[in-house]
Image (tube, rainbow, N blue to C red):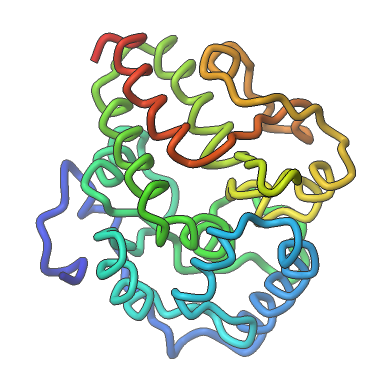
Amino acid sequence: MQPHTMTLPGDAAEYVVTQHYDQYADVEHGTWKTLYERRMEQLSTHACKEYLEGLRVLGMRAERMPVISDINKTLQTRTNWMLLPVSGFLPGRTFFDLLAARVFPVTTYIRKPDSLDYTPEPDIFHDIFGHVPMHAYKVFADYLQAFAQIARQITNDADQERLGRLFWYTVEFGLIREGGDVKMYGSGVISSVREGDNVVHRGCKIHDFSLEEVLDTHVKVDELQPTLFAIENFEQIYETTKEARKIFGV
């Protein structure tokens, strides 16, 4: 099913755009290539095997920016997820409504060449290179949906912020122990040179994953992460969604 033929939850349809692939300029493909190659220098040895496998099976490569409809064909077959091109940031409720339906919103534009290291707005590199390879792995894909099904039921601001820490320290900044080493899977460490270096060179403390500690650890959005959490396997975070339901009463 393609985005324009499905019924989207809530007000999501208001944010849908089209990826006009033939309108990308050479400089935009060049920016993608620069970012891709720069990160793969580190990720080829420091990303988890599930991420690297997802990158391969979804056909992502350095030379050209990804075609969203092509990724969807493979992603839907593997894990029944779909990417939805959107205009930018979505309201939290809309975002989680989509995730609960196994639809992941992605932007279609890429950062400017003079902003390679940081962009305050989401862009296609963070959204697709950072997030989407993990969506080709079933356990993680199921975790993402299960998390969203909880998040969309919470209306209390304090609870929303607390639960948001679980998303932050897994989906965005998650680490996993693999063969005695710490590997990356969260999009924030995957897509950022500085955050990746912060992990590899141990600029941050790495604690064993504990749901209780994660929910009590405040998020730092404007500085390098001082503390991150390493899971043993992805089944571990999927199981935490059952515990989170009890904690938040949903």
Q: Which one is in front, 141 or 161? A: 141
Q: Is residue 193 left or right of residue 135?
A: right
Name which residue lies at 16% across and 52% down: 8
Q: In this view, does 234 lie to the left or right of 74?
A: right
Q: Residue 80: x, y in percent?
A: 24, 60
Q: In which quarter of the image is residue 224?
A: top right
Q: In this view, does 213 lie to the left or right of 100?
A: right
Q: Is residue 129 left or right of residue 119?
A: left
Determine whether 59 is above or below 230 in the image.
below
Q: Quadrant of residue 45?
A: bottom right
Determine whether 147 is above or below 156 in the image.
below
Q: Quadrant of the C terminus?
A: top left
Q: Which one is in front, 246 or 87? A: 246
Q: Residue 114: x, y in percent?
A: 78, 66
Extreme residue toward the front, this view: 179
Q: Quadrant of the N terminus?
A: bottom left
